[in-house]
Amino acid sequence: MDKPTYQDTIAAGEKLSFDRFREEVLKDYRIACESREASLIGRREVLTGKAKFGIFGDGKEIAQIAMAKSFRPGDFRAGYYRDQTWMFASGLSSIEQFFAQLYSNPDVENEPFSGGRQMNAHFSTPFVREDGSWLPLADLKNVTSDIAPTAGQMPRALGLAFASSLFRNSQPLKSMTDLSHNGNEVCFCTIGDASTSEGHFWEAINAAGVLQVPLAVFVWDDGYGISVPRKYQTVKGSISEALKGLQQKEGTNGIDIYRVKAWDYAGLCEVFERGIRKVRESHIPAVFHVEEMTQPQGHSTSGSHERYKSPERLEWEREWDCLPKMREWLYQNALATAEELEEIEASAKLSVRASKDLAFEKYIAPIREQVAHSVSLLSRLTGKGGDYEPEIQALIKELSAQRLPLRKDVMHALSMAIQFAKNAPEVSEIRHYYEALKVLDGDAYNTDLYNEGPASALKVESIPSEFEEGAPLVNGFEILNRYFDALLAHNPKVVAFGEDVGKIGDVNQGFAGLQEKYGKERVFDTGIRELTIMGQGIGLALRGLRPIAEIQYLDYLLYGLEPLSDDAATTHYRTRGQQSCPLIVRTRGHRLEGVWHSGSPMGMVLGALRGFYVCVPRNMTQAVGMYNTLLKSNDPALMVESLNGYRLKERLPSNLVEYTVPLGIPEILREGTDITVVSYGSMLRIILDAAAVLEQLGVSCEVVDVQTLLPFDRHHAILDSLKKTSRILFVDEDVPGGATAYMFQEVIENQNAYRWLDASPRTLTAKAHRPAYGSDGDYFSKPNMDEVVEMIRSIMEE
């Protein structure tokens, strides 16, 4: 046998290379076909009542497949609800799991992204273990949990990319190779073209261009924002044209801008590969404007796009649909025969239908088991001659007739049966089953708002502060400054940032001198952009760091509230505990004068930030203990320091980074016998002054500092106080119906404290308007000592 020639070897190598290329592109086409079929079938499942709502990624298949080719282990995705093909192509979701989420299956074994808590196409991957420790994210393809608010992914995406910059440039982080490989990770962010009109997009893109972080933003441009055409959305009718002024040039910062066609498979692969490589190596952010994208089924199952698209537009979309265009490209380049393509398409339909059927069976089977068992239990109440039998028969008939039963149908039938036949001996078994389902299904929907395992802040051991003999009295801000100094030396994962935090050490000097000592990667300034300061914090926290992100004054929290409320506060819940966001938001408030710097919107905070801990320390020593507690746990928190306490004298503890303050445990500041007065923060100093006056008037006040609003009085210490005094007053600086109403409900209703009252429980709040400027404005706008005295005297006279 003749030895192969050099030319034979080259030819064989070229054939092998071509065969691999052909195999790859045909695999891509198969994924695209399967994803399209999933969209088509998914819509039908909603319209036939098997699912509640559907939103799909049809029309985006080819671009997402091309993008997935550059998505490597260590990278992060901060996308939105049309990225199903990317998930399929990345191997992070199966078709069956996609349908399990469409059906809202609460079993995380079947629906691993949210356990049925999020609507379809809201994906995630695990970041933490059950004990709260971080997984080796540097070796995994990572997907941050999607949220529906338009452009809501942008602040988080900035933070995820910014983390790569810190990992690359901060020496203390170099050794954390389980979290990063020298900052080589890219954050992939997707967004619909219409959503680029949101302020979130512009603030995040500007910040990315300033910071120079590896953020790759893919704009899916299908010409509409639901029914509103692009010309009404974006200046010049093109986001890439609108962004031209941000284009990075030699000697400047900025971003790179690429324009590609959604139907051009080869062009997408080439541009994405080249562009992402540059982002990864240079940390210059990029926007990929993906134009001429179609939306074959319209926006969602909530309506038809025929209502707002012209016949000409609809015909254009059919012609330039990315699937037939890729099919045409494959055939014209002799990469597949017509028969091979037809076989792929037919196989995709069969495969998707099989996955859909399996997903639905896994979803419906346990519910049908509940129905069958419930009907069996209810049937035991019939044939006994009870006057309740007609109602029970109606319940059985209604439950049995359900074509697509839900868990709530089972619960309703059992609950009504218990009510109708409450004295029948057979009811005890029904009640037992009903209560068991309440626990089982309640856990499926009502757990994991906070960490419940070892990473829970409520399980942190309480360690009291210690003071050396002759411990100096120092200003409150000095307590914080010495603490943050010790903390940064002790914990390399801690970074602190915000407006004026870096060079001058924050407006109240808590970080004074620490940037110079620890470097600009540990303590640094940001622009005036609260929204993306919060986004930076969220991204850093998701990547395993411990950020302290500052909002300069509590009033300004409104600017950054959306990502905190919709994203950080819900992360642990909407991933069933698979992701945690241990962000600490540091701010200051209370008793500063003037409309725009004196707000205490705690009611707003309590409503918007469930999933956060809300700490309201009265002094800085207490704040330090709370910081230590939070840093030993994995949940986000808001720390509201008392603005007028920074220059009040406090003793300096000797165990600054060790002592902890337990959350949700009030402290009695002054014992008394006549009335319990409940408050927090700066208001306590006014109450204590009032209590001293009242003591002279013969009234003994017990003053309680709640310390934290979330959680609130976990062991009912306020109730214990009320049992002694029989009277209670809640005081704070929020508007009427704000935090006082919250505290009132927690104590009077939830702790059943009304049983111990000898007088009407009362609240004392600020006025409904913003506080007026000046000391007189403060006096007449917010509770003052005279009002506290007068209110308590009136309660005592009831």
Image: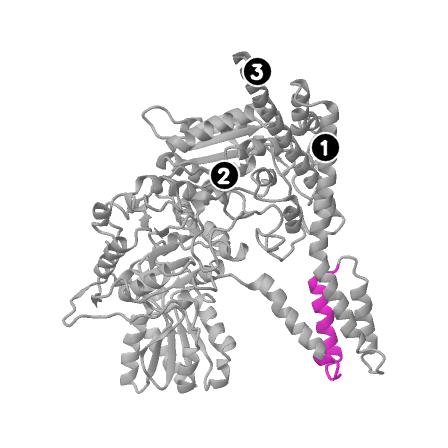
What's drawn in magenta, residue-wise? 405-428
The amino acid marked with disc number 2 is Cys
Q: Is residue 328 above or below residue 219?
A: above
Q: Are marks 2 and 1 in contact (CB under 8 Å)?
A: no
Q: Is residue 770 magenta?
A: no
Report which residue position mark 2 lands on: 189
Labelled disc at residue 11: 3
Residue sticking out furthest to the left: 470
Labelled disc at residue 659: none
Report which residue position mark 1 lands on: 345
Q: Are marks 3 and 2 in contact (CB under 8 Å)?
A: no
Residue 532 placement (x, y as % from top left): 41, 44
The amino acid marked with disc number 1 is Glu
The amino acid marked with disc number 3 is Ala
Q: Secondary structure at mark 1?
A: helix
Q: Is residue 54 above or below residue 428?
A: above
Residue 42: name its quadrant.
top right
- Dominant secondary structure of the residues highlighted in magenta in the image: helix
Quarter of the image containing the C terminus?
bottom left
Mark 3 or 2 closer to N-term? 3
